[in-house]
Image (cartoon, rainbow, N blue to C red):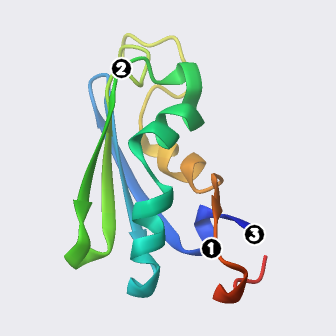
Amino acid sequence: MMIPLSKIAHTRSGDKGDTSNIGVIVYDQKDYPLLVKELTSERVKAFFGDMVKGKVERFELPNLGALNFVLHEALGGGGTVSLRIDPQGKTLGAALLKMQIKANDHMGYNI
């Protein structure tokens, strides 16, 4: 069964120059292993496609039930030099919440 990431987590994101970071935090600690399994650096990079030119790094924060992703070369050069409509990283966290992840049917998520 596929569910949107937003069913188990929320995000906080920001930026500095051409780098964005996205913190993904589970609502319930029981969902942290699912988050770790499903939300890899490779999947995040693939989700954003050509928007992220550089590497995506993942940092695990198990005591917080969170993952932090650093997306390099993700903002078209950053704030004042980017030609993007939104050259800041604050919206990337909201976008990531739409990613579909695989959950077990018995987990009881209502879509």
Choose between 45 and 20: the one closer to the eye.
Answer: 45
Q: Which label sits in the foreground, 3 or 1?
A: 3
Q: What x and y, as percent, mark residue 43?
A: 51, 42
Asked if one can make out residue 23 in the rendered structure from this viewpoint, the answer is: yes
Amino acid type indicated by mark 2: Gly
Query: How far apart, in angstroms, are the residues tagged by discs 1 and 2?
Result: 28 Å
Closer to the eye: label 3 or 2:
3
Please name the amino acid that badge 3 sits on: Met
Decide: marks 3, 1 in contact (CB < 8 A)?
A: no
- Say if 80 sits above or below 62 in the image: above
Q: Which residue is mark 3?
A: 1
Residue located beneath label 1 in the image? 7
**SS for tag 2?**
loop
79 lies above or below 106: above
Which residue bears the numbered disc 2?
A: 54
Residue nearer the viewer, 37 or 32: 37
Q: Is residue 62 left or right of residue 82?
A: left
